[in-house]
Amino acid sequence: MKLGKYKGLKISQPSLTVQEAEIDQVLEKRQRENAVVFHIDGRGANWGDEAVLDFEAECKGKPIPNGKRRSYPLRLGSHTFVSGFEDAIVGHSPGERFDIFVTFPDDYRIPGLGGHDAVFHVRLKALRLPEYQEIDDDFARDFSEHDTLADWRTEIRAELEARRMISANEKLARDLMDLVIADSVIPIDPVLKQEIADDLYEDFLLDLEADGMTLETWLRRSGRTEDDLRASQTEEAKRLIQSESVLHAIAEREHLQVSDEELAEEIAALAEEEGESPDLFIQSLGDDELESIIDQLLLDMALSFILEHAILLPE
């Protein structure tokens, strides 16, 4: 293979700044979760009510992917649905069935729906009126381990920043790998690619089974075909081969090696995950398993090398 440029790569660094509005959203979610809810009978829906809906959506005569919900709670006035949807619920009473006709905006997030008309077949199951506790120091004392709202906001900010750091680093690593791969010439063994794609497919089916979902249900909800799924996994298998080839080449060129101390630390961490002592854990490993752990550490070192030598630009 021909290894491309992997040092001094320029890439935009995602912003790690947490906005006050994001902290507000976390607090408001906790506020909603702990609201006292009163059921409403004897009148139609008003703004501010929480409508509990069953609905199915169609566009151009076909079901919309993920467009079917049961017992979906929607606060009227939240403007979380397409324009006109919530307006059409106002005045209806629990138990009524009706259709809501909407037009998706041109920039709608689901491809193929922008600018098109749709109909939602709706059943209004119930109306509820949540009573929310004010978000203040008392709220913090009731629903957190803090005595003041300011302290709770500080904790939430730290948690959001930590999560953002993880996702930002994952994105940086993937984007940098894409740059190295694009600048490299990497032969692909078609047999190996197919074997990996098949493994990815089997793993995906096992994950679906663990979630209690069939492949047919997933395909219907996602709006994809099995051929689409297979094609995406074949592409991912290709990328896995390219990534490992590049990282092995960098490790060799930069003379990277896993030290005994680094291997011992990894063994101890893996043993702790399994609830075993490091000595017993390493005795249970076969030669191939131990080599796999060492190889993964080497790949991680090569990826860290790329990150350390990248030039991060403001977003």
Image: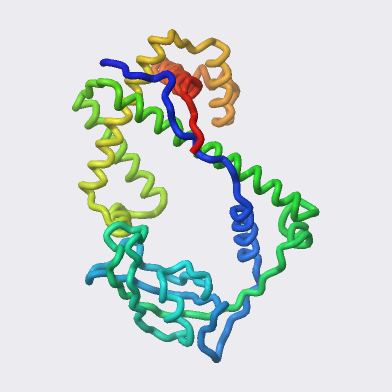
Q: How many marks?
A: 0
Report the residue that reaches farthest toward the front.
Answer: 314
**Quarter of the figure with residue 143:** bottom right
Counting from the top left corner in percent of width and height, residue 292 is at 41, 20
Question: Which quarter of the picture shows residue 139?
Answer: bottom right
Asked if one can make out residue 286 in the rendered structure from this viewpoint, the answer is no
Residue drawn at x 55%, y 41% as measured from the top left: 164
Q: Nearer the viewer, residue 281 or 132?
A: 132
Q: Residue 170: percent from the left, percent from the top?
A: 47, 35
> Image check: 26 left or right of 210?
right
Q: Is residue 130 above or below residue 159?
A: below
Residue 223 position in % (x across, y down): 28, 57
> Is residue 254 visible in this depiction of the protein?
yes
Task: Relative to 143, say whether 237 is above or below.
Answer: above
- Would residue 113 be found to the left or right of residue 31 on screen? left
Quarter of image, res 183: top left
Q: Single out the residue that lies furthest toward the bottom.
A: 42
Residue at point 40%, 33% (across, down): 175
Colour theme: rainbow
Q: Point out the residue furthest to the right here.
A: 147
The quarter of the image holding the N terminus is top left
Q: Name which residue lies at 46% across and 71% down.
A: 71
The one nearer the camera, 133 or 260, is 133
Using the image, determine if residue 241 lies above or below residue 22.
above
Residue 42 shown left or right of residue 149 in the figure: left
* Depth order, front residue of 142/117: 117
